[in-house]
C-alpha cells in the first residue's frame, strides 16, 4: 500500500514539475450499489480526490475506503473490517489516461475512454472505462459509471452472505474539477 501512495504522490509531483495544466478536486462524489434479490447495498463518499493533467490527459482518482457512508452502520462496519480490510488497504485508486484528444479551452461534452489501473483491496486491474468529460465555464466535470467484480480484487464474500452481496458492484463517479493554482 505504501508503494501505491508513493506512486500517487510521484505522479502528482511529476505533473506539477512538467508545467502541467492541472485541474483537481477533493470532493469527488463516488457511489456504489450492489443489487441482489435479498438485499440492496449502497454507499456514498463525497471525499474523493481527483487530478487531471489537461496537457497529457493523465487522470488520477483516490478515495479513502472509510469515507463511504452507508445507511446502515453495521453494513459500513462490515465493509471496512471484513471485505475491504480498510486498515490494511485504506484507499482505492484509479490512475489512467484519457484516450481521446480534447480541447479543454472550449465548453462541450465529450464521450471518452480512459485506460489505466484500478486498485481496490490492494489488487491492480487494468481497465478501460467509458465516461464523459464536460467542460463548462472554466470547470471540468468527469462522469463515469462502471462495474467492478469483487473477485477481480480478491474481496472474499463468505458463502453465508453471498446472496446479499452482488458479484459485481456498480460504481458511479462524478467529479467537478477546477484549475489548480
Image: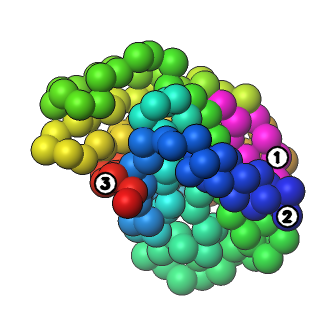
Residue 8 quadrant: bottom right
The CA distance from mark 1 to mark 2 is 13 Å
Residue under the image location 60 percent in, 25 percent down: 115
- At label 1, counting other C-alpha atoms closer than 10 Å, the crowd grade (few under 14, some 14-19, many 20 or more) is some
Q: If you read the primary sequence from the N terminus, does the residue marked by circle 1 or circle 3 appear first?
A: 1
Indicate the secondary structure of the residue bearing disc 3.
strand
Q: Which residues are magenta?
A: 116-125
Q: Main secondary structure of the magenta part?
A: strand
Q: What residue did someone put label 1 on? A: 123
Q: What residue did someone put label 2 on? A: 2
- At label 3, counting other C-alpha atoms closer than 10 Å, the crowd grade (few under 14, some 14-19, many 20 or more) is some
* Side of 21 relative to 39 (left or right): left
Indicate the secondary structure of the residue bearing disc 2.
helix
Q: Measuring from the top left, give residue 149's x and y in whole percent.
A: 68, 38
* Side of 64 relative to 111 (left or right): right
Q: Measuring from the top left, give residue 77's x and y in whole percent.
A: 65, 80
**Foreground: disc 1 or disc 2:** 2
Query: Between 54 and 172, which is closer to the camera in this rendering?
Result: 54
Residue under the image location 73 percent in, 69 percent down: 90
Q: If you read the primary sequence from the N terminus, does the residue marked by circle 1 or circle 2 appear first?
A: 2
Q: What residue did someone put label 3 on? A: 178
Q: Measuring from the top left, give residue 157's x and y in whole percent.
A: 78, 55
Query: Between 164 and 53, which is closer to the camera in this rendering?
Result: 53
Q: Is residue 111 magenta?
A: no
**Foreground: disc 3 or disc 2:** 3
Q: If you read the primary sequence from the N terminus, does the residue marked by circle 3 or circle 2 appear first?
A: 2
Q: Is residue 121 magenta?
A: yes
Residue under the image location 49 percent in, 50 percent down: 51
Query: Between 106 and 31, which is closer to the camera in this rendering?
Result: 106
- At label 2, counting other C-alpha atoms closer than 10 Å, the crowd grade (few under 14, some 14-19, many 20 or more) is few
Indicate the secondary structure of the residue bearing disc 1.
strand
The CA distance from mark 3 to mark 2 is 28 Å
Amino acid at each position: 500500500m505504501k508503494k501505491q501512495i508513493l506512486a500517487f504522490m510521484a505522479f502528482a509531483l511529476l505533473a506539477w514539475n512538467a508545467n502541467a495544466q492541472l485541474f483537481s478536486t477533493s470532493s469527488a462524489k463516488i457511489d456504489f450499489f450492489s443489487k441482489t434479490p435479498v438485499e440492496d447495498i449502497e454507499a456514498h463518499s463525497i471525499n474523493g480526490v481527483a487530478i487531471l493533467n489537461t496537457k497529457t490527459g493523465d487522470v488520477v482518482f483516490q478515495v479513502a475506503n472509510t469515507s463511504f457512508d452507508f445507511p446502515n452502520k453495521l453494513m459500513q462496519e462490515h465493509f471496512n473490517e471484513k471485505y475491504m480490510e480498510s486498515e490494511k488497504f485504506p484507499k482505492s485508486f484509479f490512475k489512467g489516461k484519457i484516450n481521446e484528444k480534447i480541447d479543454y479551452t472550449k465548453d462541450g461534452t465529450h464521450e471518452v475512454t480512459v485506460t489505466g489501473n484500478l486498485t481496490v483491496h490492494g489488487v491492480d486491474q487494468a481497465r478501460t472505462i467509458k465516461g464523459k468529460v464536460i467542460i463548462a465555464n472554466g470547470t471540468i466535470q468527469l462522469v463515469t459509471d462502471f462495474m467492478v467484480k469483487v473477485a477481480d480484487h480478491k474481496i472474499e464474500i463468505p458463502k453465508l452472505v453471498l446472496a446479499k452481496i452482488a458479484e459485481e458492484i456498480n460504481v458511479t463517479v462524478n467529479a467537478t474539477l477546477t484549475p489548480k493554482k
